Amino acid sequence: MLGSLSGRVVVIGTVAVALAGGVDAVRGDNADLLVVFLLVAALQLALLVRLQFGRRPVPVRPDLAAWLEARSALTGEPPAAIAERSIAEYRASLRGDNG
């Protein structure tokens, strides 16, 4: 969880720097530089939205990550799909669900 929080902090900091650079570019009457700073800010905001509302990362032990990669190579199924199915099956076994 800390990794995603620090990632958000870095993105927000980058947006702040890009906006400050954009203000300086406007004050210096430098349109090309303004476009660059606004593009950086827009890309970082898009990344922030993805970090905020995208899938949450789940840390996995190295041996399990290696198993996921090997299983993916064997079946051609994406590792994320294998992990989701495995977690769902484990949850069902804990609940005692039959299907």
Image: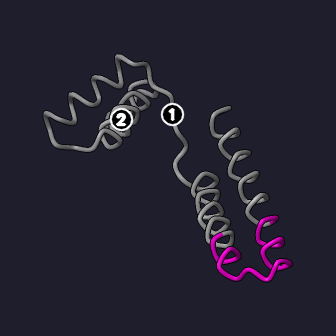
Residue type at mark 1: give it: Val
CA distance separating discs 2 and 1: 10 Å
Residue located 67% across and 66% down the image: 41
Q: Quadrant of residue 16?
A: bottom right
Q: Quadrant of the N terminus?
A: top right
In the displayed structure image, the side of residue 96 where residue 49 appears, left or right: right
Q: Provide the secondary structure element on which disc 2 rests.
A: helix
Magenta stretch in the rendered image: 20-36
Q: Residues within 10 Å of mark 1 (few under 14, many from 20)?
A: few
Residue type at mark 2: give it: Ala
Residue located 17% across and 35% down the image: 73
Residue extending farthest top: 63
**Residue at numbered disc 2:** 83
Q: Nearer the viewer, residue 24 or 70?
A: 24
Q: Nearer the viewer, residue 51 or 80?
A: 51
Q: Provide the secondary structure element on which disc 1 rests.
A: loop
In the displayed structure image, the side of residue 12 where residue 98 appears, left or right: left
Q: Is residue 6 above or below residue 12?
A: above
Nearer the N terminus, badge 2 or badge 1? 1
Is 96 included in the stretch rendered in magenta?
A: no
Q: Nearer the viewer, residue 51 or 15?
A: 15
The x, y position of residue 97, in whole percent, is 38, 33
